[in-house]
Amino acid sequence: MNVKFLNPFTEAVQMVLEAECSLSVQRGPLTMQKSSMTAEEVTVLINLVGQVEGTVLYGMNVQTALNLVSRVMGQEFPELNDLARSGVAELGNVITGQATIKLSQAGYESQISPPTMIEGKDVEISTLDFQRIVVPMTTETGDIIVHLGLRESRAAV
Amino acid sequence: MNVKFLNPFIEATYEIIKRETSYEMQRGQLDLETDPYLTDDLTVIISLVGAVEGNVMYSMSKQTALGLVSRMMGQSMDVMDPKVQSGIAELGNVITGRAGIKLAQRGYETNISPPTLLVGNGAAIYTLDISRVAVPLFSNDIAVKIHLALRASIRGDTGTLDLEGPSVPRQL
């Protein structure tokens, strides 16, 4: 995992959460993880393909997901239903889209996959031979843990 | 989910598993699943980006994973260790790569992402606005389920992000 791919994502989280949710976001301490991670209650998974490739995961608890989606949609969501799931996944999609625009400005063209949502803490998520940089993004409505398992693509260079 | 994207994956799974493990598989009943996918012991997730986009998942029991990797590596594996996990992820990668070639031959150029592996059962996976078709493939000893949530790409919709939001005041 190349650290230069980090800032586009942390900036995109800050930018999108401020625009969509009127939230200010603080970045927590970085860690590097090699082993598989235990899933959070809610995880949005999006893959990158192109000159940067790999996996981006946004993990959070259910309450944080509900808080975020309530702010995005401007109405209270008491439970994680299909509309709320769609909202949380879309937030991940928009953040990742913004990050790839920044990556492209830095000379790395990539495309993003449609999001997948994983619900339930009973699984381990492994990015295999991709090391992950993990950065918690803290807001007043809860934390979003961003996992980046990315590398410069060998094929595209 | 467009069913025409199905056959390349069924063929690729059959061909690669036969080539790598000599298991001859049969295809079971196709199913459009509306509930989320509840994870089996092991699930490989790979995304497609390009003219066809979405997610592909290959799910199996621990026993199937051990059976497949034992044959791939030519030695008996009886514990679910990182080598087995890596072998199954690679199998998913090769199958999806071959399916991608078949899609390209049908006029759909796509690129595939590196695999992600989920270990453990009982989590719910939502493919959200792309519906999911599941196809079981099995032999006497092993069973693999292919889950496809794919669509023809709607390029042009991506990239145009309205960060301002609607110009209607929100009640928070």
Image: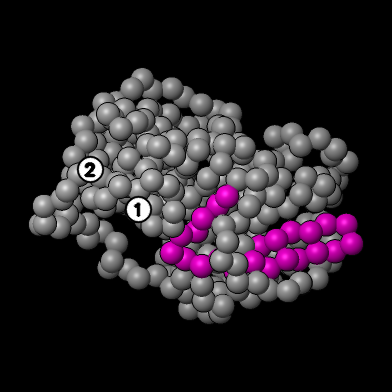
Which residue carries the number 2 mark? A21
Q: Which percent across, then down, holds residue B5?
A: 55, 74
* Chain of residue at mark 2: A
Distance Cα–Cα, label 1 vs label 2 = 12 Å
Q: Which percent across, then down, holds residue A23?
A: 21, 36
- In the displayed structure, B3 sits above or below A114; it is below
> Is residue A1 among what the camera can see?
no
Which residue carries the number 1 mark? A87
Q: Which percent across, then down, holds residue A72?
A: 26, 49
- A38 with respect to A135 (left or right): right
Q: Please say whether residue B67 is one of the residues in the magenta stretch.
A: no
Magenta residues: mostly which secondary structure? strand
- A79 with respect to B88 (left or right): left
Identify the coloring: one colour
Which is more toward the observer, B104 or B79? B79
Q: What type is the residue that disc 2 sits on?
A: Cys
The residue located at (74%, 59%) in the rendering is: B144
Badge 2 element: helix
The image quadrant of residue A141 is top left
Which is more toward the observer, A52 or B144? B144
The residue located at (26%, 59%) in the rendering is: B159
Query: Few, some or many C-alpha atoms within 10 Å of disc 2 (few <14, some 14-19, many ≥20)?
Result: some
Residue A61's disc number? none
Which is more toward the observer, B36 or A136? B36
- A110 with respect to A53 (left or right): left
Q: Are marks 1 and 2 on the same chain?
A: yes
Check whether the beta carbons of the residues at disc 1 and disc 2 lie within 8 A of each other: no
> Is residue A142 among what the camera can see?
yes
- B85 with respect to A36 (left or right): right
Q: Which region is colored magenta? A: B124-146
Q: Please say whether residue B136 is one of the residues in the magenta stretch.
A: yes
